[in-house]
Amino acid sequence: MPYLSPALNVMVAAARKAARPLIRDFGELENLQVSHKGPADFVSNADERTERILYEELTKARPGYGFLGEEGGFREGPDKTHRFIIDPIDGTTNFLHGVPIFAISIALEREGQLQSAVIYNPISDELYVAEKGHGAYLNDKRLRVAARKSLPETLMATGIPYMARGTDEERERSLAEVKAIVSRTSGIRRCGAASLDLAFTAAGRFDAFWERGLNPWDIAAGILLVREAGGLVTNLNGSSDPFSNGDVLATNETLHPQLMAILQNPFS
Ligand code: IPD
Ligand code: CA
Ligand code: CA
Ligand code: CA
């Protein structure tokens, strides 16, 4: 059974409560109101409502904590040592297309350190939790990252920037990375939800995940899951702080240096 600290219990309850209307919406997608935040960047009233429920539930239980959410930005609380980092729906494009690969992602940071994490896919009912020092779990099962050491045996996950986003140079680099990795591994998956890419890496389903330009809400909970499952998460310069630029490489300790060498020189 997973270790659930009082805070983690609150986070799980909030995720389950916010998931209920999402499950209903998923059956009636034609009723959602969708708007554009930017090119190929959508937000629906379901994203906004989910964040509102999470905000209400979490701040009711922990009134002083700060709250950083994708849709509402940062709301400071009197307690400067704690903040929740929330993605109400990670994988909005999948959600809006009826693809059941999306999740509610909630992390709790204490004094700048990731302390507790929840990632919940309401459709598959897979609940991932982690508490610093107490391991990572999928429902009741303890997680370990995959042990594979040889690249040709590995299954990789990534996210490719939408064509409307980033500079030409960034898009070319991203495609070069995909080419370099696909030719050396058993394949690449692009699932469309960074939180679940990290959760699947923690569960050993994927051997590794990399992506550039993510936001803290996409990755905060997933980083703790992978670390508590024995994996290594850095940015693509090797720094242990992927929040610094949103670039992430998550894998086991043996594959990490091999993948880093390829991703740092994808054109060679
Ligand atoms: C997106 C997903 C996607 C990643 C994008 C994110 P959203 O989050 O995590 O996999 O490639 O960069 O923006 O917008 O669906 O919450
Ligand atoms: Ca979004
Ligand atoms: Ca996201
Ligand atoms: Ca989102």
Image: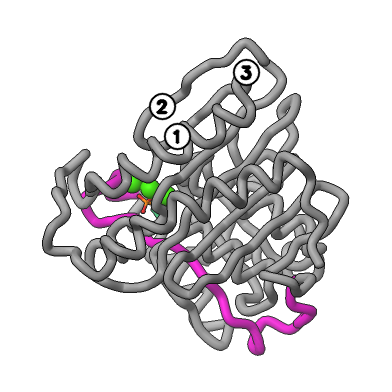
Whether label 1 lies within 8 Å of ligand 4 gets the answer no
Residue 218 lies, with reference to residue 250, above or below; the image says above
**What's the amino acid at mark 2?**
Gly
**What's the amino acid at mark 3?**
Gly
Compare residues 152 and 92 and report the one nearer the observer.
92
How would you rate the neighbour count of disc 1 (Cα within 10 Å): few for under 14, some for 14-19, many for 20 or more? many
Query: Residue 162 magenta-drawn?
Result: yes
Residue on which disc 2 sits? 73
**What's the amino acid at mark 1?**
Gly
Residue 118 lies, with reference to residue 183, above or below; the image says above
Contact, mark 3 vs mark 2 (Cβ under 8 Å): no
Q: CA distance from mark 3 to mark 2?
A: 16 Å
Q: CA distance from mark 1 to mark 3?
A: 16 Å
Which span is picked out in magenta?
145-169
| Residue at the far top in the pictured view | 78
Query: Residue 238 magenta-drawn?
Result: no
Mark 1 lies on a secondary structure that is strand
Residue on which disc 1 sits? 69
Q: Main secondary structure of the magenta part?
A: loop
Q: Examine the image and state in which quarter residue 178 appears.
A: bottom left
